[in-house]
Image: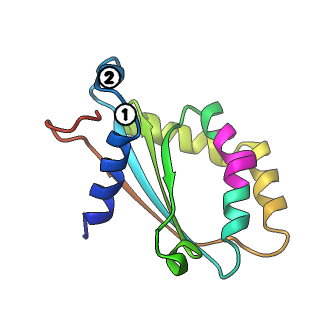
Amino acid sequence: MNLRPLLAILSLICLSGVSMSQEKTQATSRVFEMRTYYTHPGRMEALHARFRDHTCKLFEKHGISIVGFWKPLDKAKAEESMVYILSYPSREAAEKSWNSFRVDPVWIKAKEASEKSGPIVKKAESVFLDSTDYSPIK
């Protein structure tokens, strides 16, 4: 697995103003999930709109904390992929949050409406991560 994208993203998190004092107030058992979405051709803007208009609010409703969203600097890759990182108090909390999110009628309706012009996500990858003992974000 190529860890360069992950290291770059985590470096950006550190530079984005996440303070160590804020992080120390959270449970040390917190886990992160890095998700990469690959879209069908011409559907990236629809994915961004769905997150902007619906998904982010629903994540909050279901206890899913957003760390951030990123798009590749390479223009061609930015048209087909997006990376985001979420955090949860534990792996079990992540599973519970995703289970409730997936069956939420508001999510189902938003997903169906956003895909009237065709499917958006071609492939999704998910990796759960633990912070290292020397990581500034925990």
Looking at the image, which residue is at 43% across and 38% down?
Answer: 87
Observer-nearest of 96 and 110: 110
Query: Which residue carries the number 1 mark?
Result: 90
Q: Is residue 38 magenta?
A: no
Amino acid type at image mark 2:
Ala
Residue 48, how many percent across, how many down?
67, 59
Observer-nearest of 128 and 4: 4
Residue 32, how many percent across, how many down?
37, 43
Give the magenta part as a residue range: 50-58
Asked if disc 2 and disc 1 are in contact, CB closer than 8 Å, the reply is yes
Q: Is residue 51 magenta?
A: yes
Residue 30, how many percent across, how many down?
34, 32
In the rendered view, tell whether residue 88 sits above or below residue 4.
above
Left/right placement of residue 60 relative to residue 116 reads: left
Q: Secondary structure at mark 2?
A: loop
Q: Quadrant of the C terminus?
A: top left
Looking at the image, which residue is at 64% across and 43% down?
Answer: 56
Residue 135, how many percent across, how many down?
20, 38
Left/right placement of residue 125 relative to residue 48 reads: left
Which mark is nearer the camera, 2 or 1? 2
Query: Which residue carries the number 2 mark?
Result: 27
- Give the mark count: 2
